[in-house]
Image (cartoon, rainbow, N blue to C red):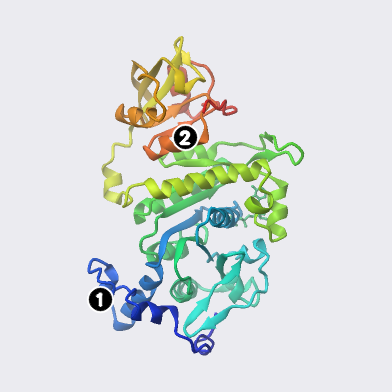
Amino acid sequence: MLSADEHDAGHGQTETDQASHGGKTCGTCGDTGCSASRRQVEESEEEFAERRKLAARLCRISHKVAVLSGKGGVGKSTVAVNLAVALMMAGKRVGLLDVDFHGPSIPTMLGLEGAAILADGNDLLPVERDGLKVMSLGFLLKNPDDAVIWRGPMKIGVIRQLLADVAWGELDFLIIDSPPGTGDEPLTVCQLIEGLDGAVIVTTPQKVATVDVRKSITFCRELGVRVLGVVENMSGFACPRCGEVSPLLSTGGGRGIALSMQVPFLGSIPMDPMVTQACDNGCAFVRDYAASPTARIMREIIETIAALDQRLPEHPPSPSENENREDRHMRIVIPLADGRLTSHFGHCASFALVDVDQTSRQIVKREDIAAPPHQPGLLPSWLSEQGANLIIAGGMGQKARELFIEQGIQVMVGAMAETPEKLAGDYLAGTLQLGQNSCDH
Ligand code: ADP
């Protein structure tokens, strides 16, 4: 890390100074509800000053999203980079903070290896690449392996310092590439970032990886951090010639866990050699390979994150709310024609509402109801009023899926034309077969 002397090398007015003198520092902005406006009982003056400084930085950033994973190597940094670049391409002011000690890979992925960090007073200035502001532990380490041998408290101190010292300025989004797992390091990230909008959890599809996802979701719930959704990476293999995705090992583990733990499933990114190539060459995949089918998939996932970010309730459910929630029962909705699932979701004549008990894995009740008169945009709110938790469909367009997710209704697409009992039974047994999304717009 930079020493205090290096920090003091600049003599200009710092962002924190400007903020406090310009009336933006927490405690001077008049928001008496802000936790940084008052010293806490157990807090020393020094700790309070540090917390105010951090709050002053963070309150100039509209949205903060952490990217988490149960373990390393699943594509967390790849998702973080592409999320940041896609948001920037959508006209947002974006910062990307890499605090993954287990291999800070963001500099390599953005072609910023060896970039020098400049200091301005006590502030560290992020490195800019095409308008994206980037700060990575990798910039601060002489040798990328150095941090691996650091002890826990040192890592936590470094995370704290990076969060407090980097002068991001005004941002729409800060994306944080967190250390993997559910230990002290990601805990520090989630605890220090007040007003964290939520976490995106990245996994690979295999069952062993999904055990870690379950832990990550529980970790978020215990901390009161909203899970924006689960991304299943390296799911199938994208043909380098035609882009068609073929199954590779097992798929669907991330989707299954997301559904069973009632958090949004954001989508599956296939393993694509061009993604590896882009990362190794320092290119942002969503931008530099924008025409590829995998880049389109990534953009759809990212659009969902941006949409969720605007629509979800102000505060994530507290752990106690989660405990009290009736998690056992859920209502599955299936569009019907002739007693079986129809792929014409938006134009079906009726829906089966199948109530299931997730604990005993039993179907409790089935009731069929007539679809309302066709009216664009009506079904999400109408099905929400019917108490739907999950839709099993043959196909559905991305926009429609987002509208259901906003209503808290999960969607599984690619199901076969079976009876509602068979589909719900297979879902409960974890054996529901899903094929191609036969998109019905
Ligand atoms: P993590 O941050 O979870 O440790 P990374 O994002 O660093 O994982 O990815 C690990 C490696 O896998 C990198 O070399 C990256 O290029 C590659 N990778 C990630 N996602 C994909 C994908 N969908 N297709 C191909 N390679 C990928």
Instruction: Give the CA distance from mark 2 to mark 1.
Output: 45 Å
Question: x and y percent of residue 149 in the render?
Answer: 58, 72
Can residue 235 be seen by looking at this rendering?
yes
In the rendered view, would you say 168 is above or below 249?
below
Left or right relative to 115: residue 307: left
Left or right relative to 343: residue 62: left
Residue in the image at 28% along x and 76% along y: 28
Q: Earlier in the sequence, mark 2 or mark 1?
A: 1
Q: In terms of image quadrants, where is residue 113?
A: bottom right
Q: In terms of image quadrants, where is residue 234?
A: top right
Residue in the image at 55% along x and 67% along y: 133
- Label disc, if present, on residue 233 of the rendered structure: none
Q: Amino acid at mark 2?
A: Arg
Question: x and y percent of residue 73 in the render?
Answer: 61, 54
Some atom of ligand 1 lies within 8 Å of the CB belonging to the residue at label 1: no
In the rendered view, would you say 117 is above or below 11?
above
Report the residue marked by disc 1.
Answer: 39
Question: x and y percent of residue 216 in the render?
Answer: 45, 51
* Quarter occupied by the N terminus: bottom right
- Label disc, if present, on residue 401 of the rendered structure: 2
Q: Nearer the viewer, mark 2 or mark 1?
A: 2
Left or right relative to 433: residue 62: left
